[in-house]
Amino acid sequence: MPAIICTSIVMVTRKMRSRNQQLGCVLALRFLALILWGVLGARALDNGLARTPTMGWLHWERFMCNLDCQEEPDSCISEQLFMQMAELMVSDGWKDAGYEYVCIDDCWMAPQRDSEGRLQADPQRFPGGIRRLANYVHSKGLKLGIYADVGYKTCAGFPGSFGYYDIDAQTFADWGVDLLKFDGCHCDSIKHLADGYKYMSLALNRTGRSIVYSCEWPLYMWPFHKPNYTKIRQYCNHWRNYADIYDSWESVKNILDWTASNQEKIVNVAGPGGWNDPDMLVIGNFGLSWDQQITQMALWAIMAAPLLMSNDLRQISPQARTLLQDKDVIAINQDPLGKQGYRLRKDNNIEVWERPLSNSAWAVAMRNLREIGGPLSYMIRVSSLGRGVACNPGCFITQLLPMKTELGFYDWTSSLKTRINPTGTVLLRLQDRLYHKV
Ligand SMILES: *[C@@H]1O[C@H](CO)[C@@H](O)[C@H](O)[C@H]1NC(C)=O
Ligand SMILES: *[C@@H]1O[C@H](CO)[C@@H](O)[C@H](O)[C@H]1NC(C)=O
C-alpha cells in the first residue's frame, strides 16, 4: 500500500533535524511518492474518456420511474424532461461550470424490443425517439447518457440486454449516445454478471463511437466476493460500489462510511479514465440541510466522484446552485492528477479527509459528525496533513466551504483552528508556497 510506505518514509525524515536537509529530502520524497502512485495505478479502460470524473445530470434519484405523463407531465420520464434540463444546463451556467452529460436512467424504454430485436423508447413519452433527443442535446453542446441492464430485465422490469449486447451497443452508437449506465439487476449468476460487463465494454468499443461506460459491477458483486478492481478498471470508466443514494442524510452518511471503511481496496484504483462512483449528488432537493449539502459537495470532491446531479434544475434554490457551481470545489473534483482522497483520521466527533492535488496542493475536509449542539472547534497540527509534506516548510491555506476565506500562511510547526457546524464540513485547499500565485 503506497499510503503506508509514504507515511513511514515521512516519519523517518521527521527525525532529521537540519532544516535544509529536511526540505531537500521532502522534495525528493514528494517525487518518489508520485512515482509510487504512478506505478501502482492500474490500467484504465482505453477509450480516452473520463480523464476527470464525469459531470452532468441523471434523472433517477429525483424523478425515479414516473411513467404518468397524464397526471404529472412535468415530472414523468419523457423527452420533454431531458430537453428542458438540457436547455437549463446551458442557460443557467451548468454547462460553463463543467456539467456536460444529460443522462437518462431506467424507465425510458417501451416494454418490448422492436421486430428486429432492438430496444426502443416508449413511443408516447419519447415521440421523437432517442436519436432526435441526442441531436437536440448535442445542438446545445451537451452529451446524452442512456441506461440499460446486463441481465434479463432492467431493475424496473424493462427489457434487459442479456443476449443482446452487440445489438444494444450498436443501437446506442447509431442514436449518438455518449454514455451508458449499465445496471446489474436480474442477472442469474456471478459469471454472467462479470462476463456481461466485460462483453458490453468490448461491444461498445467495437461500435467505434466514444461512449463513457458507467458500471454497477462491483455493487452486484460484493455479496458474492471481493471485486477485482484492477479488472473492473480495465473495462469501466466508473463503477458503483454501494447502494443507491436517497435524498437523506442517513444515505449520504452510509455512503461516506462505506467508502472510508473500504478505502484500502478502492482508493488507489481510481485515476484518469476510471473512478469510484458513490452515486448522484442530491443537493438542491428536500432531504439535506444546508450543512449536509456542503458535506456532500466537499466529500464528493475529495472522493474524485462523478458529479451527476439528480435534482430539478427548473426549481432549485440560488444557494444550492451556487454550491453546485462552485468553481474552486469543482476544480478539486476535476484535479488533473486524478488521485482519489481518503479518510486520514476519525476522532470522537471529527473526521479529517484529504486528497493530493496537482502542483503539490492538497484538499482537506473536516467533518463534524455530531448531530447535537452548535459549531465545534477543532484544532489540528498542519504537519499532520498531506502526508507530512503539504505544509513543509509551510503552506497557504484557503477555506473553500462553507465560505471562501483566505486563512493565510501556516508554517510547519503551527496549528489550524476551525469551527465546524453539526453534520457540516469545512473544506480547505493547502498550497505549497513554491506554487502559490500572489
Ligand atoms: C477501442 O479500444 C482500443 C484499444 O483497446 C482503443 O485504442 C480505441 O480507442 C477504442 N475505441 C473506442 C471507440 O473506444
Ligand atoms: C485481477 O485482475 C487482474 C487483471 O485482469 C489480474 O491480473 C489479477 O490476477 C486479478 N487478481 C486476482 C486476485 O484475481
Image: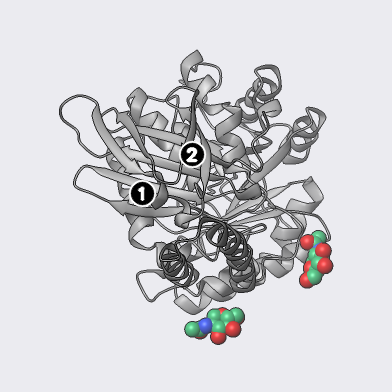
Q: Mark 1 or mark 2: which is in front? A: 1
Looking at this view, name the residue that lies furthest to the left: 372
Which quadrant would residue 245 be assigned to in this image?
top left
- Residue 271 seen in this snapshot: yes
Residue corresponding to mark 1: 256
Q: Position of residue 345 (x, y in %)?
A: 32, 53
Give the residue type that dot 2 points to. Trp
Residue corresponding to mark 2: 60
- In the shown orientation, is residue 7 left or right of residue 261? right
- Residue 317 seen in this snapshot: no
- In the shown orientation, is residue 372 left or right of residue 178? left
Q: Residue at x 58, y 45 (%)?
A: 361
Q: Position of residue 145 (x, y in %)?
A: 66, 44
- In the shown orientation, is residue 147 left or right of residue 154? right
Give the residue type that dot 1 points to. Leu
- The correct choice, above or below, for 230 with respect to 306 in the image is below
Q: Tag 1, which secondary structure?
A: helix
- In the shown orientation, is residue 154 left or right of residue 145? left
Q: Tag 2, which secondary structure?
A: helix
Classify mark 2: residues with Cα within 10 Å, few (<14), some (14-19) or many (20+).
many
In-front residue for pair 339/249 = 339
Looking at this view, name the residue that lies furthest to the front: 18
In-front residue for pair 314/351 = 351
Image quadrant holding the C terminus, namely top right
Mark 1 and mark 2 lie on one chain; the one further toward the N terminus is 2
Q: Residue at x 30, y 30 (%)?
A: 420
Does the residue at mark 1 contact the one at mark 2 (Cβ under 8 Å)? no
- The correct choice, above or below, for 297 with respect to 9 in the image is above
Q: Residue at x 50, y 70 (%)?
A: 2
- The correct choice, above or below, for 155 with respect to 307 in the image is below
Q: Position of residue 217 (x, y in %)?
A: 50, 65
Q: How is the image coloured?
A: one colour
